[in-house]
Every structure is written in C-alpha cells, then in structure tokens.
Amino acid sequence: MSQKIKCALIGPGNIGTDLLYKLKRSPVLDPVWMVGVDSASEGLKRARDLGLKTTELGVDGLLPYLAADSVQIAFDATSAYVHAENSRKLTERGVMVIDLTPAAIGPFCVPPVNLLQLVEKREMNVNMVTCGGQATIPMIAAISRVQPVTYGEIVATISSESAGPGTRKNIDEFTRTTAAAIEEVGGARQGKAIIIINPAEPPLVMRDTVHCLTETAPDQEKITASIHAMIQEVQKYVPGYRLVNGPVFDGNRVSVFLEVEGLGDFLPKYSGNLDIMTAAAAQTAEMFAEGILAGTIILTPTCPVAPAA
Amino acid sequence: MTVKGKRITVHDMTLRDGMHPKRHQMTLDEMRAVARGLDAAGVPLIEVTHGDGLGGSSLNYGFPAHTDEEYLNALIPLLKQARVSALLIPGIGTVDHLRMARDLGVHTIRVATHCTEADVSEQHISLARKLEMDTVGFLMMAHKADAQRLVSQARLMESYGANCVYITDSAGYMLPGEVKEKIIAVRAALKAQTEVGFHGHHNLAMGVANSVAAVECGATRIDAAAAGLGAGAGNTPMEVLIAVCNRMGIDTGVDLFKMQDVAEDIVVPMMEHPVRIDRDALILGYAGVYSSFLLFAKRAEKKYGVAAREILIELGRRGIVGGQEDMIEDAAMSMAKARGLI
C-alpha cells in the first residue's frame, strides 16, 4: 500500500462526517482522528465505528497525539468563532489547516482556480470560502480569464433542509465572504453575493446563478469555451456539477445557470452545497498531500504569535 | 370583533414595493413629490429603498436609478411628521446596510424572510432591537405555511426582539378566510405588546378585503400604496383602504382627499404601465407566485416565446420563493428548449 498523509477532522457534524467518507476513499489521505466537544455526539460514534480515534475535548484533546500519530493535515468544520484558536494551535505544531468555516484567516481556496498557487506558496492555512463561492467562483474566473469583469454577482439557492444552524445564525458571513472571494479569486472588480433558502418539498437540488458584466462586449465564443472547460475541471471532484442553461449573453451581461448535485456520501444528494465544500476541501488536501509525499512541500511550524493584549 | 374607533397604523409602500413596477428607476424628484404628499396627508410611516430592500441593487433584481443612501438622504429631511422605514432581506442585505439606514435616520427596520425561515433574521432583528429601532419581522409568502408554522416563526422573530410581526401575502394569493385564521393564530401567540401587521397584494383584488379582515382579527399595522403602486397587480390601494376604514370607523389619521390626490395627481402619472390585474398578475395570485416576478416573466416571454403566465405557473410548481428572480429566465429557457423554440 502506498504511503498516505494522516489527517484529523475537527467537528463531527454533517460536514465533518461527509468529509470523512470522502477522505476514506482518497489514495493519498488517511483520516485518523475525529475531534468533537460532546461525548454523546453521533458523529464521534460514527467516526469510531469507521476506525478513527476520537476525543470530545476539542482540539486540546488532539494536540498530545499529533506527533505520535504523525497528523499533518487538519480540517476544521466547526465555527468561525473557534477556528482562529484551533488554527493557531495546529499550525504552530506544523500541521496544515484547511478551514471550512467562514473565519477566513488564511487565503481563499477555490481548487480549479487557485489551488496550485497556494500549494506553491506552501500556505499553512487555507479557507474554503462558502458553498456558494465554491459553486460559482470557477465560473467567474472562467469569464475573467477571457476578458476583464467589472462586476460579478452570484445567487445561490440551497434547500432549507441543507442550511444548518451555523449558516442561519450568521447569514451575513456568507454574503460578505463570498463577495470578497468573487473579487479576490474570481477576478471581478466588484463582487456581490445573494443567498436564498428554499423550503420546497421534496428539497431542491442546489442552484447557482452567475451574472457577470464584462468591461467590453463579451467574446461569446471564447467565454463559452472557457466556461465549458472550467465545468470539466470542477466535475473532476464534484461529478454532479452541471450547466443547466446558458451562458446567456445580453449586452455586456453574461449569465450562467448551474445545478450542484451531491454525491450522497453521507448527506442527501440535493445538498450539493455541502458536497461541493467537502469535495473541494478533500481535493485541496490531496494536492498538498501529494506535495508532502513527493518532498516538494515540507510543513514548517508557524512562529507562535503572542495573543493580542 | 368590532373595529369601530380602533386605531391602526397604515404603512405606505409606494416608494419601496412601488419600485418594482418602476424597475427601481424612480427619480429623486418623483420620490420627493410622493413623500411630501403622503406626509401632508398624514401617513405616519413610509417605506423607502430598492424594491428588494436595502442592498437589493443587483443584476438579479435590477440596478436602481439611485443608491439606497441617496433615496433616504433625499427624503428623510423633507418629512414633517412621517417616519421612514426600510426593508432588509437577510441573504440580500446585511447588518452593514442596517447600520447605514439607522445612521441616515431610518426609524423602522423590517427584516423579511420566507415564512418558514425566520431563524435567518436573528442577527438583523437583534441588532435593530439593540439600536432601539422600531423592529419588525416580515414573514413573506405567508400562504406557504399553515397557521401553526407561522405561529412558531412569528415567535422566533419576537424572541429575537421584533416588536411587530407581519403576515405578508407576497403572492396576493390569500383570501379573507385564510387571512383571518392566520392573523388570529399569530395574534393569540404573541405577547400583547407585540403588534401584528398585514401586507397584501391585489392580484386577486383582495387587497382591501384582506386588510380589513386582518384589522378585524387584531392586526394594527397595515401596508398599502398610493394607487396601489407595487409589485404584481400592486399593493392594497391606500386611498381605497382609507375610504373603507373611514366607513367602518377605523381610525387611520389619514386625510382621504389628500391621499386620493397623491394617488391620482402624482403616482398614476408616474406609472410606466397601468398597475392592474392583467392576465399575468392574476396568475401570480392564482398560482401563489412572488409578485415581483411579474415584469421578469413578461421580459422572458418576449425573449424566449413562452407565455409569461405559463412561466409563472412553472415557477409555482417548482416551489420557487422570493428572491429567486434568476429562476425566471432559467425556467423560460428550459421550457423553450423543451418546445424546440431555442
């Protein structure tokens, strides 16, 4: 059996559990720890059943075992509030952290757009933006690599069933973080994000619409080709990522209508929003792991930073 | 329940919901003229902003002629007695918009969610409460949830700090019996000091009848617009509501003749098309579809050759909710493809 990089998952909720199923299939990643805060958690039990070590003491319960179990990559699927501390403790000890919370301490990562650059920079903490960001920013980048985009806007609609309490309590984080990443990663000069939660029964598959304004008249042929090429890139890790309609060209507006169906690993297929987050996180970890295995990436502990007074 | 002598607050929608039929292109002068007229007529509360509320400026809903800041700044200093409210739909606008509105002198914030998703409003309602604003929860598309569900959602909004909760008939679908059942249930469930409101659309010509039914069941805030200027076939026409309230002895504090003149002399001439129950607006109410979809569906009909009312029925079938304007062009294209039109 080829060598694998050992990983820890923090947060045994829906996202953490779905991610665990994906990591179990990875040729280069080996999930060995699941970290929670509640000993009665279903997620911790499920992880134990799948052969992982678990702790209900939060990240502090994991730290003493990092070295012995050679954990090199950790995924944080908890909340923005605790991520900063989790990340500090882990990166100080040389563990690379993939952030699935809206904390966004590290640079945004949208795999088909900028993962290679982040790997080259040996980033110790990368942020996976939001589900809507993962679903739409590849399209904005596909347009902005053809010609300048003055304005990029996305509308993400997720089913009520798949919108967790964290998203609901802090929905502004979604719009802010996504809008920022539309600019920073997507390459639009100005970004705007809208999220809609739809309660229809049976639950709707995640829908994402991307509207861009190009600076000059859009080169329809090139943009169409670029979009189709980018869709294939995303489909490599999210097979249910599909173009439903478009691109529509209307003056300088370019609109793309997408649907994201999940793999149904742990979560129902309609929750493509959760699937695209976990798939993107797994894809990101795999690329870092390949670098570590090839010796091109050597994880070095970050300097401890004194906490702000 | 007798309503004679009952005092209600009428809340004008002309400069917010009325932005939908104006494609959000109202000029500052148009807004000033309407606001002055409403103020002089005694309307106590006037909503202002993009039709989709604070932060609604977008390709999806339409870019407005002016920013929310520009509209609010132009109007608030003009008003002698009326106060200004702003709508905020979480997922579109954020607490940053809320703070901006308050700093400009907005008195009332109305935080709107789909009627089953009230828990996305916690951030915004609790901040508005903390800022000591008149804080309203606005449960949209209220025909999509039964009374019990609405009660649970209204209680959530109240628990976050709303001092008033609205039953909002965004699709103009509800009939008076349903309005009564839902208002009674919500009124009974909330604290006595929490107000209950009703927002109607006139797609089935029920705007006034539904509003009166709501008042009879304990609602004390009623939305309406001059000449009904609002999405779909418009909102409850304010001048008609005032006349009916006068007849019933409901005290609105609004001068009927002055209100009629605002509608007739200022608002009707502003209309880009007659805001009336045409065949498409009727289908909004008939199929239970978000009223602001009307003009988008008409545009999609022109572009893709599928009748607007068929698109609207398809959107209703799919369970599309407020804010999903993107799905109108999407549905039209999918329907046109299936018919070999594109």
Image (cartoon, coloured by chain):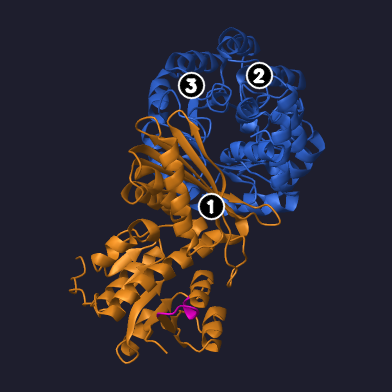
Chain colours: A orange, B blue
Amino acid type, mark 1: Val
* Residue that numbered label 2 is attached to: B275
Looking at the rendered structure, the secondary structure element under dot 3 is loop
Amino acid type, mark 3: Gln
State yes or no: discs 1 and 3 in contact (Cβ < 8 Å): no
Q: Residue at x 73, y 53 (%)?
A: B148
Residue A10: x and y in percent read: 42, 76
| Rendered image: mark on residue B120 | 1
Q: Is residue A285 visible?
A: yes
Q: Residue at x 38, y 48 (%)?
A: A141
Dot 3, crowdedness within 10 Å: few (<14), some or many (≥20)?
Answer: some
Amino acid type, mark 2: Val
Quarter the N terminus of chain B occupies? top right
Chain bearing mark 1: B
Residue nearest the viewer, comparing A123 with A229: A229
N-terminal of the pair, mark 2 or mark 3, is 3
* Residue that numbered label 3 is attached to: B25
Q: Is residue B279 left or right of residue B47?
A: right
Dot 2, crowdedness within 10 Å: few (<14), some or many (≥20)?
Answer: many
Range of magenta residues:
A23-28
Where A304 falls versus B169 (above or below)?
Answer: below
1 and 2 marks on the same chain: yes
Q: Main secondary structure of the magenta part?
A: loop
Q: Is residue B174 visible?
A: no
Q: Residue at x 37, y 85 (%)?
A: A61
Residue nearest the viewer, comparing B141 with A215: A215
Q: CA distance from mark 1 to mark 3?
A: 29 Å
Q: CA distance from mark 2 to mark 3?
A: 16 Å
Residue B8: x and y in percent read: 65, 29
Where B242 falls versus A305 (above or below)?
Answer: above
